[in-house]
Image: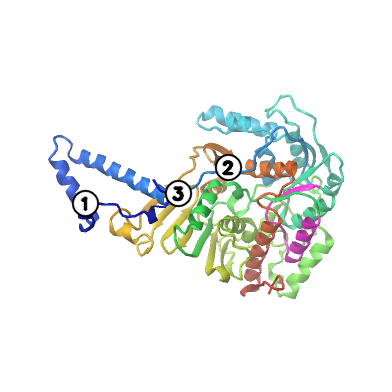
Amino acid sequence: MSDDINNRKDTAPDNEKNRPVKKHSESRRDALKTLATLPVLGAMGYGVYKKKKNEENHRIASQLFHFDEKQTILPVQPEGEQIRLGIIGFGIRGSQLLQAIGFATPTYVEDLKETSRKNPSNTRYQDFLDQDSVNVVINGVCDIFETYAKNASAAGANINREGLNGKYGKAPKIYKHYKELLAAPDIDAVIIATPDHWHGTMIMDAAKAGKHIYAEKPLTWTVPETYLVKEAIENSNIVFQLGHQGRQIEIYKRARDIIEKGQIGKVSLIETSTNRNDPNGAWVYPIHEDANPSTIDWAQFEGPEERVKEYMDYMNDHGLEKYIGPESRDKFSLERFFRWRCWWDYSTGLSGDLLTHEYDAMNQIFDLGIPTSATSSGGVYFFKDGRTVPDVLQTTFEFADKDLTMLYTATQANQYNRSRKIMGHDATMELGSALTITIDGASTQYKDKIDSGIIKPGEPFYRYIPGRSVDALTSATEMYFAERGLLFSYVKGKRYNTTFLHIREWLECIRQGVQPSCGIKESFEEAITAHMGTRAYLEGKTKYWDKEKKEIV
């Protein structure tokens, strides 16, 4: 049967073509009349009839939204050369990154084993053991909190993925300063998972040191350094990947394919969102019991003096002193160290943390590039804990060259699940852990199928679910990412951790000398977009992208 069902000729007999089309209610009455003449079946028979009808509708929907299955990740070469890694930053995300490629503290593995014993349906322990090898060795770790540094070293030594009392490998060297790690000759590539205000500086230093880089998003803390980072990467021979693991989600590739074929019509509005409603989701992270001025290098945490001055000057020049934290940056603070996302002094806020996931998802699908303008509003409406970063944010991005608006709304005080919605003239596509298409009642493309009763507008017509996760999720934050499809992806029917796939792609690109899916071009677009949203919020006015001068105005 042809994939292009819309272009098929009407092959019905001539005496059938002119028959009036029956409405849903008429078809249902006719079916019931027929079934009523059959012995025993009754309503049960109608249930069977309805099931067959639904199956037929599903078959037609699958033909309409046909997707060419293809390999979407870089071919893996398990026999490739071993890569020697270093990691800078081993807090929440840093530990997750190493876990994703098979390196975890023995304590973490024990927790997985205990969870598996208590709940056999939770497969995380077995998934961790079965995870493919990426053929790397961890040779160096750096964290300015002593306990985290020791944990990173323990994870790097746990080459057999064992719990307590296991057989471990050689412990990676602990470096007190990241520049010492970058100077190490036995490190080929680095993973950077530090607070936002350190990203740009460390990326530039790593590029100059000739180390391949996997850096957590966002790309940069300030606008000026965004250009410097781009220049540093482009003038190097290193392979750079930004940590948008959503690049590995097969469902986005299917969405792009459907949209490129014009099957939901002209898209003019995209709605994305963030809803979380617990302290962890609002960045009120636990304070470690080992933390104190003796175990934390506060001076390193503050960052380079010239960058701090640049930030302060910018805020003062734009009359934004109110957004500078009430505490002095040089005053030791456990809250600021562990909950740094709550202050502009170190953070990029909702724009850099969560909006970037939404933007990158849409950028993959539409090749959005940098918006022509950004307008933002919001404030600190719920978490009155001294933070300067808003817990409610609305940002509207206009893409004038595409006749398209992207609306982002966020709250950290309500967890109602809102899917991403891509609104076309003929249908609306919703994206989360599944892809759902609902045909619009006013569609012109599908008018004949609506009139003939094949499509019932306003109800989900096509649904694609790449796989189902039954794991017990441990936090509202984790649930949020699962519902966005950001925890797992499926390759040829097998479930993978998306972070594993993203790091593996980076490693294979290093081995094969090619560029990954979220390189400096995509990263620059992400950074400028996020900064436009942030500056629009801080300055209380619409910010524009000057395409000719390549600057925010």
Residue 66, disc:
3
Q: Could you tell me which residue is drawn at 29 percent across and 52 percent down? A: 11
Rounded to the nearest angstrom, the CA distance separating label 3 from label 2 is 16 Å
- Kind of residue at disc 1: Ser
Residue at mark 2 = 71
Q: Percent position (x, y) of residue 333? A: 74, 54
Report the span colored magenta: 211-235
| Left or right of residue 20: residue 221 | right
**Percent position of residue 42, x then y:** 17, 39
**Relative to residue 389, is residue 492 depicted above or below?**
above
Q: Please, what is the three-letter code of the amino acid marked with disc 3?
A: His
- Looking at the rendered structure, the secondary structure element under dot 2 is loop
Is residue 474 visible in this depiction of the protein?
Answer: no
Residue 209 seen in the current view: yes
Q: Quadrant of residue 136?
A: top right
Classify mark 1: residues with Cα within 10 Å, few (<14), some (14-19) or many (20+): few
* Residue assigned mark 1: 27
Q: Earlier in the sequence, mark 1 or mark 3?
A: 1
Image quadrant containing the C terminus: bottom right
Location of residue 162 in the rendering, given as x and y in whole percent from the top left corner? 68, 27
- Where residue 421 sits: x, y (%)? 48, 58
